[in-house]
Image (cartoon, grey):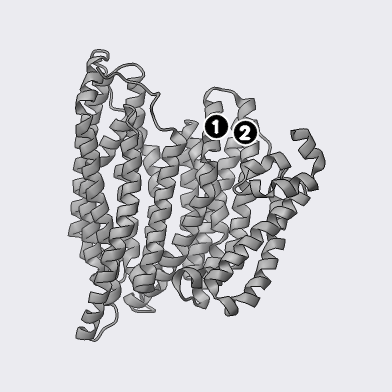
Amino acid sequence: MKSYTEEKRIRPDILTSVVFWSVVVIMIFKIIGNRIYGDLGSGFGAAPFAFFYMFYGCYVLAVQKAVWLMVRIRARRSQFLNAETNMKRSRRLFVFISFVTGALLAALSYVISKNLFGSGRGYLQFLIVAIMSLIFGAQGVYRGYLQGLGYTRPIVISDLLFAVTAAASGTVISVIMYFYGLKVNELFHVQEYSAIYGSIGSIIGLLIASIICFIQIMISFSIRKNEIADIIKNGAPRYLDNKNDVISGIRPILYLYLTPAFMSLLSEGIYMAIHKKDAAGTELLLQYGMLSGKVFPVVTALSVICCLPFIKTWNRVMARIERDEYEVARDRLKKLIRYSTVVFIPVTIVCLALSETINVALFGKSNDTTNSLLTLAAPVIFLACLAVFGSWLMSHMGKSLLLVINLSVGWGVFVIGNIVFGVVLDLGLYGIVLTHIVSFLIYDIISFSMIFKMLKYRQEFMSTFLLPVAASAAAGLVIYFINMIFVNLIGDALTLLICILVFWIVYMLIIIALKRIKTYELRFIPLGGVFHGIASRMQPEEYEEWN
């Protein structure tokens, strides 16, 4: 007879890492898509992708977490009957809401596409996303229920399956539909149908992945149905004062998860509204496609990759806070910030120094606008990493109200930034990037000020931030000249690899020489172990102390 246990659960850091890797795969998928159908196709797909992120973040990720929290609290009290009742209530509610939002998007797809996002020819993509909303309705509830009862393996499989299926099927269908669109272009003597059809292929890939993952979750739930029944049978009787706290619990989670997607959607809508009198809709979509199809995927992918090595440490900091061991938590937080900034800062500088080479290596071509946009957006990598960690820490500390306040302040800055940079200064795409930088910066400052105050922690800035910046600047200057010399001789892709290798060697040697990183600390830095021999000679006293 099956009983409830938490021993065989997959560790939380692994679950989070899988989600992050899935995001990276989706960003690579978007980069490949841009190579297929170009900036115009990325422009047509920008708003539908944003709606997809909103629906997936809401109905799958946010609902899953809220249901998981509800089930976990009741499972530890053996209140499995109450958990099952709340799960069914939540399922009915979110299926209904997903049908409403999907129906509204489908009904208004042409109006939204034409009046808000430049051209009515992209309405089919909104229709496909509306169908996905219907599929997502119950998926998050089942995922959260399974996770709450200790079945974490189906969640990991679902996340990986979604990303890989969407990327693989979407790429193949995009290629097929792009070439079909070229024939339509010749038939109607226009240029945009290949881009439209190619971007539709990407959205169809997401739809296929959504259907497959829904089937996978339902099969996983059905297979374990008898085991779940045994768990419920062994639990406590039903409590009459059972309250479904999924609704109250999901509000701050929903606010957090929807913010990035809604910011992207609002940025495009404001950009289209401001400039629709100056250029045709397809021209505006072509311009915005440079941002949504090239700059945002690269910056997002690099930000998430930077976070991946430190997820386990995040959980260790949180575990100490939950046990009220604030002294140990402060020590671990200090080490986390010390090690993570050694990675966040140099990645930002590399993107800043090699923007043109990165664009050509990833997308096959570049222009001055795309290069300058990626250069300007490079600081977002560092700021986004801090924002992810700060948001995660505030959420897991149970400071939902403070998290909502911080997000609201960030939204206020975002709206003001769009007015100042977009309307008053008329900076166009550059204004959107500047708005994101300022919004992230203010949000990070407020969040970490609160976290430091709650933990009574004081951050040292000289060694933690300024030394990595100085070392990165020196290494960045080296690869800047290497890039100038070799890019026309051996090509952009090979030059990029050489520059990254040289940068990391020079950078690590500098911070080791400056004793920013001790010999024994290299094991906490990605690829840091490679420099252990050199560090033991450059820091003999540290090496002897460690041994």
Q: Is residue 381 left or right of residue 534?
A: left
Q: Secondary structure at mark 1?
A: helix
* Number of other residues with Cα within 10 Å of mark 2, as a class: few under 14, some 14 to 19, many 20 or more: some
Residue at 35%, 71% (x, y): give it.
Answer: 36
Could one spot residue 373 in this view of the protein? yes
Within-10-Å neighbours for mark 1: few <14, some 14–19, many 20+: some
User: Measured from the top left, where is residue 365 in percent x and y?
Assistant: 47, 76
Q: Secondary structure at mark 2?
A: helix
Tags 2 and 1 touching, CB below 8 Å: yes
Identity of the residue drawn at 33% across and 62% down? 47
Q: Nearer the viewer, residue 120 or 20?
A: 20
256 vs 112, left or right, is: right
Relative depth, front residue between 12 and 71: 12
Q: What amino acid is at disc 1?
A: Arg
Question: Farthest front residue?
Answer: 533
Q: Amino acid at mark 2?
A: Arg
Residue at which label 1 appears: 316
Residue 129, x across and y down, in percent = 25, 56
Read off the residue under disc 2.
Answer: 332
